[in-house]
Every structure is written in C-alpha cells, then in structure tokens.
Amino acid sequence: MLVLLLQPQYEKVAKLFNGANAVHPGIILMTRVDCANKRFTLNTCLAVQINRKLCVKFHILHYPILLWGAPSKFVGGHWNGKKEKSEIISIEDGKTAQRLLKWINTRLTSSYDLEDEKFENDECLQSNVSDPGQVD
C-alpha cells in the first residue's frame, strides 16, 4: 500500500526529466521496476521475469526503494545494500516529491523545481551557435 501512496510523488519528479513533455530531458533517467508483481499472465510473463532478475541482482528486500547511480553501473553492476564503496546508492530521504527533488538537487548541485515549466521556444534555446546571417 505504501508504494501506491508514493508512486504519484515519484511520478511528479520523473515528469521533470523523462517523457515527451519533460522540462529537463536527458539530465537523469528515472524508471520503475515492480519487484512485488507475482502474477503471471501471457502479457506480463516476460516483464515479470525481467523484473525478478533485476530485483535479485540488486537485492531488493523491501518496497519502495530508490537507487541512484550511473546508467552503466545499473547495466553492468549490482548493489548489495551496503553504502560504503558502492557506486549505486540508496536514496533514503525521498518520501515526497519535494524531498526527492531536494536530494537530487543536492547531488547534482542544481536547483530544479517541481514548478519548472518548459519554454515555448525550447528549440531556439538548445543551440548556442550564432546565426551566420545575423553576424556582420
């Protein structure tokens, strides 16, 4: 039940960084893995098998758990629940969207906010190259 209560909080933060309407795309990747799903149907069988392997690989013993690390560490590494000398760490203070984003901001030395909005002319802001026609 706790996971269902926290899911909307995590989704608020994820929407800042992931998806077609992300305000800050490409900064971090947030993804969800369901370690509690024990149901097997034709549609979910493969997903459940993949999730179960990930959950075992990362020693997921309780839900929810938030892990932080470089993508390459998730692909090629593992996490054993120990904090010392681990390149993947557990986020302990992420029970609300605001607290999770504060943790991320501290880690990245950034100042992202849940109220951040996408600029209407984002495509103009992405290039820092001068237009040769505008330079005399």
Image (cartoon, helix red, strand yellow):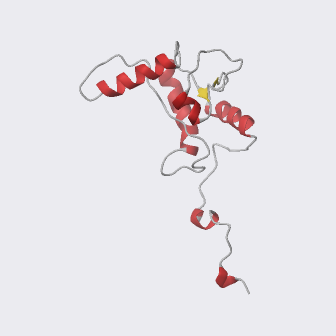
Locate residue 18, reporting x and y percent: 53, 44
Query: Residue at left 58%, top 48%?
Result: 26
Q: Where residue 59 sits in the image (x, y, percent)? A: 53, 15
Q: Look at the image and tell me in which quarter the C terminus lies.
A: bottom right
Q: Residue furthest top?
A: 61
The answer to whether residue 79 of the structure is visible from this angle is yes
State left or right for residue 101 relative to residue 5: right
In the image, farthest residue toward the front: 76
| Side of 105 relative to 54 (left or right) | right
**How many numbered discs?**
0
Q: Between residue 117 and residue 80, name the one nearer to us.
A: 80
Front residue of 86/26: it is 86
Can you give x and y, in whole percent of width and height, for residue 39 in the image?
31, 18
Q: Is residue 1 visible?
A: no
Vertically, is 59 above or below 111? above
Quick one: 81 or 24, which is closer to the camera?
81
